[in-house]
Every structure is written in structure tokens, then in C-alpha cells.
Amino acid sequence: MKTKFISILLLSILSPIGQALACATCYTGNGSKVTAHMAIAIWVLMGAVMSVLGGVGAFSFHLWRHAHTPLEPHQELAEEDFDQYE
């Protein structure tokens, strides 16, 4: 039981090290076109995410700003005594 636990522990610890030592063919090198294209794709996706978040923020600001503006005179409710209707 103890050896199984130790072997599972060692395999779980050492398995990421094998992936980190992959060659430049699997994980492209610094000067390849694939790396440059992946960097461009990452920036495009970051731009898409930031534009969506910016739109949500702008709409939230729009709602906040319009919630704090006073109503026009024709939109205000008339002050009436509604006790007679109860």
C-alpha cells in the first residue's frame, strides 16, 4: 500500500516535468511563424474581450448617468392626495 502511494505521488509530481521538456517541434521555437501567428491571435482575442467588457462598462455608465438626472417636468408625477381613493 505504501509503495503504491509513493509511486502515484511520484508520477503525479514528475509528469508535468516531462511536458515542460518538450522539443521545439511540439512547442514551436521563438523564431517560428506559428509563434508569431499565435501571438497575433492572442492579441485579437484580447481585443475582442476588452471591447465587450468596454461595452458593458459604457452601458453601465449610461444607465448610472441617466438614473441620476432629474426628470423633465412633463414626466414627473403630479403630487395628488390619493387618500380619497382608498
Image (tube, grey):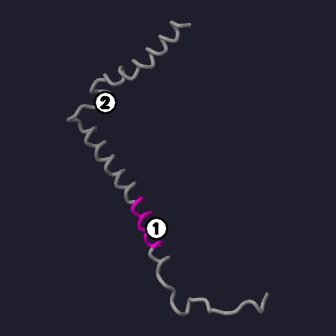
Report how far apart the C-alphas of labels 2 and 1 lie in the structure.
42 Å
61 in magenta: yes
Residue nearer the viewer, 9 or 38: 9
The disc placed on residue 27 is: 2
Secondary structure, mark 1, is helix
Residue topped by disc 1:
60
Picture quarter with the N terminus: top right
* Residue 13 in picture, x, y percent from top left: 42, 19
Direction from residue 78 to residue 60 in the image, left or right:
left
76 sits left or right of 47 in the view:
right
> Mark 2 is on which residue type?
Tyr
Instruction: Report the residue at 39% width, 18% height from top.
Output: 14
Point 43% across, 70% down: residue: 61
Residue name at image x 38 percent, y 60 percent = 51
Does the magenta run of residues contain 60? yes
| SS state under label 2 | loop
* Number of on-image labels: 2
Q: Residue at x 40, y 54 (%)?
A: 49
Magenta stretch in the rendered image: 52-64
